């Protein structure tokens, strides 16, 4: 056991904040105050103050003269605190190298540094079981409910405010349907109709009802039906502190009753997951919707027709199941890719559709990482960099093993803002989570080229299979950076390596211009319908005016692509040009 003085105080305080930010403490002011008090006093060398009488006064607001024989608040809360710490280190904090304990029989905390998973497992086999038994003794119903299911909820019979047997049956039927809907959600233990309806027509206290039903949360509410009009009030209450986490009022036509059932169920699930940090929702979608979704995901995006094809399939999936959040996230991503990489003949409302799809996905599933990733892309597409970065951070927080988020964060935002070192860091994380991904390897080559590290970029390109989309482009650009212009032209001109992405013709035209084949380059620029291709070719020709004009045309279709091109080494001739500074300012980029 290591005394606190031998450990870094700052590290201990960071561990304390990590514990207090966890699910078990974040909304429990009493236990938070208790743990913070004993840890801070200990770190200040004031163990003499960690007595039952002092804690009762300082933490729990008891008056001087407090008698622990008459009031066991400190002992009972200490038991709960030990149990809550055991939960944290058995779950969210199981990989932490530092552990905070409150040994039984005292109030001086102990800190442990654990080396390796074996020592940690031995420690918790010894510590977690006694702590769990303490919790059972102190609040048995709550702990037992937790052992049966992740989260236990009871739906109390909705009160009929309309009177009459028909309305009474209607209210009971609505209650039954909500119970049924919630029962289909993974991670929820829902009390049966028999248990819940024992409270029908009876006044109840939330805590007492929760204890009798062994539930963590209660849903209660009322129904008023008048003719074809329907009003439903509902609220979700946390049992242990009688806190209303969510409430909703629904004024609808009676014909909308099934939609209301789904809406109430979805709101409850989302609120539970947001407040207690449980995992992703289990999507109860149809086979047809899921099949369309998978087909959309399989469409190759880096092609002229791919994004539009994927969007159509996602739309069909949504038509089959309007509550299937991943389909909305996928559609937003497809819109983003299409709008940036293939900016020709797009609908004028594409940007609004892109963001609306991402926001709808988040509304349906607030813990869906790909939805926040898609929203980050939508914000970046529109040059709202701060909003984009917050969205990418949220996506990473929700799923740290999703390599695509790191990839999108690096390419859609960090590269555009010129933060190349950070972009490389994110891609290194993506590489660790997905080491065999050709897409990640290609992205690393891309950022290394932007950073001027051409030799390293070429090595990544040569590792890629010959048929990898973009391999020729990045290898050719690496060769251009190395001054091997003839080799770059040969790579880009090779029929078997002709890319599926039209921007590659821009790099070929740039290479022609660099090699002195100016007429061929000029002809390619005139024939091109893509402003980004023209910007590259004009840059190769050394024509600043037409390069800036092409970038300005690109800006009309979105800020993200312009920012990316302004940072390309191929457009280095614009560095320091006042017009480039104006353009950067126009789209919100740092100078």
Image (tube, helix red, strand yellow):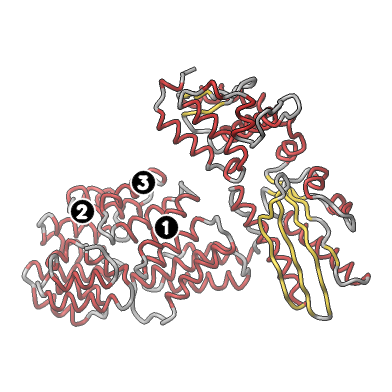
Horizontal relation, residue 240 to residue 202: left or right? left
Q: CA distance from mark 2 to mark 1?
A: 24 Å
Q: Label 2, on which residue? A: 451
| Residue depicted at x 45% and y 75% | 352
Q: Label 3, on which residue? A: 431
Task: Find residue 306 and report its image quarter.
Answer: bottom left
Q: Nearer the viewer, mark 2 or mark 1?
A: 1
Closer to the N terminus: mark 3 or mark 1?
1
What is the x, y in percent for residue 472?
24, 60
Q: As displayed, is residue 187 above or below residue 338?
A: above
Q: CA distance from mark 2 to mark 3?
A: 18 Å
Horizontal relation, residue 208 to residue 573: left or right? right
Q: How many marks?
A: 3
Crowding around mark 3 (Cα neighbors within 10 Å: few <14, some 14 to 19, many 20+) is many
What is the x, y in percent for residue 547?
17, 75
| Residue depicted at x 72% and y 56% | 182
Q: Label 1, on which residue? A: 390
Q: Mark 2 touching mark 3, by CB under 8 A? A: no
| Residue depicted at x 67% and y 43% | 150
Task: Find residue 477 and report its image quarter.
Answer: bottom left
Q: SS of the residue at dot 2? A: loop
Closer to the N terminus: mark 2 or mark 3?
3
What is the x, y in percent for residue 541?
10, 73
Q: Nearer the viewer, residue 419 or 481?
A: 419
Task: Find residue 248 and report its image quarter.
Answer: bottom right
Q: Nearer the viewer, residue 95 or 82?
A: 82
């Amino acid at each position: 056991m290591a005394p606190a003085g031998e450990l870094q105080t700052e590290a201990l305080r960071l561990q304390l904040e990590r514990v207090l930010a966890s699910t078990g403490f974040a909304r429990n002011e009493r236990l938070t105050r208790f743990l913070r008090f004993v840890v801070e006093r200990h770190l200040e060398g004031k163990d003499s103050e960690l007595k039952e009488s002092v804690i009762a006064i300082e933490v729990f607001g008891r008056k001087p003269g407090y008698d622990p024989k008459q009031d066991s608040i400190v002992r009972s809360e200490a038991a709960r605190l030990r149990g809550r710490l055991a939960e944290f280190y058995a779950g969210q904090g199981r990989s932490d190298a530092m552990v905070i304990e409150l040994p039984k029989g005292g109030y001086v905390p102990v800190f442990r540094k654990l080396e390796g998973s074996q020592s940690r497992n031995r420690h918790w086999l010894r510590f977690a079981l006694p702590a769990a038994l303490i919790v059972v003794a102190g609040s048995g119903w709550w702990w037992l409910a937790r052992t049966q299911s992740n989260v236990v909820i009871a739906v109390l019979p909705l009160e009929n405010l309309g009177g009459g047997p028909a309305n009474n049956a209607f209210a009971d039927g609505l209650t039954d349907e909500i119970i049924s809907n919630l029962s289909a959600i993974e991670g929820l233990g829902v009390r049966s109709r028999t248990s819940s309806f024992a409270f029908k027509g009876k006044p109840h206290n939330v805590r007492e009802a929760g204890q009798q039903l062994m539930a963590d949360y209660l849903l209660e509410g009322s129904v008023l039906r008048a003719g074809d009009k329907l009003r439903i009030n509902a609220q979700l209450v946390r049992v242990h502190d009688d806190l209303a986490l969510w409430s909703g009022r629904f004024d609808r036509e009676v014909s909308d009753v099934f939609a209301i059932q789904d809406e109430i169920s979805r709101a409850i699930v989302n609120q539970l997951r947001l407040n207690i940090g449980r995992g992703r929702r289990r999507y109860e979608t149809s086979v047809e919707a899921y099949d369309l979704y998978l087909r959309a995901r399989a469409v190759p995006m880096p092609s002229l027709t791919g994004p539009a094809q994927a969007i159509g399939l996602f739309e069909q999936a949504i038509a089959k199941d309007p509550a299937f959040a991943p389909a909305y996230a996928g559609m937003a991503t497809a819109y983003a890719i299409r709008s940036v990489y293939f900016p020709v003949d797009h609908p004028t409302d594409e940007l609004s559709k892109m963001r609306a799809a991402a926001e709808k996905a988040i509304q349906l599933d607030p813990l869906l990482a790909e939805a926040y990733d898609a929203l980050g892309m939508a914000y970046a597409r529109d040059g709202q960099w701060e909003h984009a970065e917050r969205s990418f951070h949220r996506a990473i927080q929700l799923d740290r093993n999703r390599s695509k988020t790191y990839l999108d964060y690096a390419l859609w935002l960090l590269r555009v803002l010129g933060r190349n070192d950070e972009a490389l860091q994110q891609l290194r994380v993506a590489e660790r989570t997905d080491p065999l991904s050709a897409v990640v390897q290609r992205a690393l080559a891309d950022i290394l080229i932007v950073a001027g590290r051409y030799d390293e970029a070429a090595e990544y390109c040569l590792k890629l299979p010959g048929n990898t989309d973009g391999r020729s482009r990045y290898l050719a650009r690496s060769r251009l950076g190395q001054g091997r212009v003839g080799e770059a032209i040969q790579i880009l001109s090779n029929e078997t390596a002709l890319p599926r992405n039209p921007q590659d013709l821009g790099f070929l035209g740039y290479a022609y211009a660099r090699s002195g084949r100016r007429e061929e380059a000029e002809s390619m620029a005139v024939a091109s319908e893509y402003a980004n291709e023209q910007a590259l070719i004009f840059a190769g020709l050394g024509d600043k005016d037409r390069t800036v004009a092409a970038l300005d045309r690109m800006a009309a279709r979105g800020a993200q692509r312009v920012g990316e091109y302004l940072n390309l080494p191929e457009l280095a001739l614009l560095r320091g040009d006042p017009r480039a500074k104006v353009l950067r300012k126009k789209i919100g980029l740092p100078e």
